[in-house]
Image: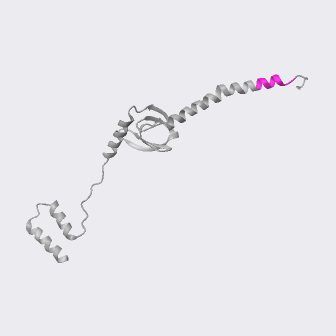
Amino acid sequence: MGTNGQPMIPQLIILVVFIALMYLIMIRPQKKKEKEVQDMRSNVSVGDEIITIGGICGRIVKTKEDSVVIQVGADKTKFEIKKWAISTVEKKSENRRVDRDEVALQEERKVKPKRLGKKATTMEQEAEALLESAPEITTETADAIDTVVDAEA
């Protein structure tokens, strides 16, 4: 009973209705939006163009479990960011197979260190490699190299 002998039921009903309206107006739409953002972040793939929460625009070149590697700028700088830092997906890749092939081609184009030559196990093999690489060596020089090789053996 209330203070004047009236029941408190109408006041409780108003309170319950107010809480239900707050849930329907504020909390439910926020949770729905969070779920959509989480789905968007979990479904990003190679080739998608994204914008991070810091405003960096780039293209995804590699995905991992909880992070992605993006490529930005004209010099194609790559760096890794966490998936939670993705704000929006600007452009979904339409043909994912082509994008993966393109990324594979870019990886192949990377400059690989040149090998200095075959690793010789003996002085004789070194002399043969030297003769093959420099055909202008005369027969006299070749004979001198053979003499040195024979003397060491």
**In what quadrant of the picture does the C terminus appear?**
bottom left
- Residue at 84% over, 25% down: 8
Residue 145 versus residue 116 in the image, above or below:
below
* Magenta stretch holds residue 11: yes
Query: Residue 89 placed where, x, y %?
Result: 46, 33
* Magenta stretch holds residue 103: no
- Residue at 52% over, 40% down: 84
- Residue at 44% over, 31% down: 90
Residue 21 versus residue 144 in the image, above or below:
above
* Snapshot colouring: one colour
Q: Residue 53, can we see it?
A: no
Query: Residue 114 placed where, x, y %?
Result: 27, 55
The residue most toward the left is 139
What range is drawn magenta here? Answer: 7-15
The residue most toward the right is 5
Query: Residue 14 placed where, x, y %?
Result: 77, 23
Q: Is residue 35 left or right of residue 107?
A: right
The majority secondary structure of the magenta stretch comes to helix
Res. 105 image quadrant: top left
